[in-house]
Image: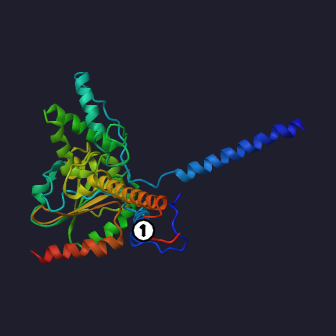
Amino acid sequence: MNAPLPAGAPPTGGRRLLAVLLVGGFLALLVLLAWGVSRSDRPDRESLPSPLIGKPAPEFSLPVLHDPDYRVGSADLRGQPYLLNVWGSWCPGCQEEHPVLARYAETKRIRVVGYNWKDEPADALRWLEQFGNPYWVVVTDYEGQAAIEWGIYGAPETFLVDAEGIVRWKHVGPLTDRIIDEVVAPMVDELEAGR
Amino acid sequence: MTALRARRPDARLVACLLALLAAAIALVPAPAPAQAVRNVQPLEFRDRAEEQRFHDLTLELRCVMCQNQSLADSDAPIAHDLRREVFNLMREGRSDAEIKEFLVQRYGEFVLYRPQFGGSTLLLWLGPGLVLLAGAVVVAVVVRRRAAANAAALDPVDDGQEW
């Protein structure tokens, strides 16, 4: 295969450089692949970064679950920050995060607005009856039309919106105590301090 | 003997089925984020051209829930909603580019199967070309070196060595 080289001749500088480059490139590729594999078991590996962060929350006005004649919307919520939590009675992850959300809502640091998505109102009410209602108010989006404006694609999802109506943060998937303590609470404190 | 013979493939078949079952269980995907289930009215197109345009457009868009399917293929409820949204936007007379922009503004660049060129996608677009170029350089260097070595071997007078 190789051209006949004098036995025992030291490899030329160029040849050594090439070998180093090839081995180095191969190792770099291995590291890249290992990094990819190590990231693949993140629970939120499929969550999409929201393009709404730093932008005004979409305008909406939706019927209230407990009184459908009454509507609540973005205009009503302005003036103080709020946490918008997307849930449905059909959603196991929502049940999972419910105690976490309830615990944080009880501190009354921030209004927690429920966004009942693609749910039968009767089911939603029964769900709240059964597990407890941590929400300041629950709005309903039966058709899921307004949810498209928010970029909602699953439940649970949670948005943090500041007093000016700017989306500050979004989380896809169930909230955990750790996320509340390490991310949400500090951001909420910061929003309060900035006012 | 025949009975024994007949039984043997049976046992093998059972083992085979068990293995298949085990494989199927192993392949069950991790619990995906929950989705609501609801029947949705099928979309009604005015004509073939509109249907074709809709089909082509939704093939270019990625379903945000089941991320390896296009919007056209997916049966997730959110895909139903987004298809309806795309349909309504088409009816409003928006162009394909405007419809894509609408979805990108809400769900991010991720929804595009063919991401826009530039910014954070530069490496994505140019990466394969760069790798190809690097490979070509390596091949060129190797070929040139071999040619030089061969020439030297064929014409020992030219190299100053004593063999």
Q: Quadrant of residue A134?
A: bottom left
Q: Position of residue B58 (x, y in %)?
A: 28, 37
Residue at the image position 44 percent from the left and 63 percent from the top? A37
Q: Residue at x 39, y 68 (%)?
A: A21
Residue occupying image coordinates x 22% and y 22%: B46
Q: Residue furthest top?
A: B47
Left or right placement of residue A134 versus residue A93 in this view? left
- State which quarter of the image contains the N terminus of chain B: top right
Q: Secondary structure at mark 1?
A: helix
Dividing the picture into quadrants, the one containing residue B89 is: top left
Residue B67 drawn at (x, y percent) = 36, 49
Whether residue A51 is situated above or below residue A31 in the rendered picture: above
Residue B7 position (above or below residue A97): above
Residue A30 percent across, percent down from the top left: 44, 65
Residue at which label 1 appears: A15
Give the image location of residue A72, x and y in percent. 15, 53
Q: Residues within 10 Å of mark 1 (few under 14, many from 20)?
A: some
Q: Nearer the viewer, residue B43 or A41?
A: A41
Query: Would residue B59 be found to the left or right of residue A83 on screen?
Result: right
- Can residue B56 be seen? yes
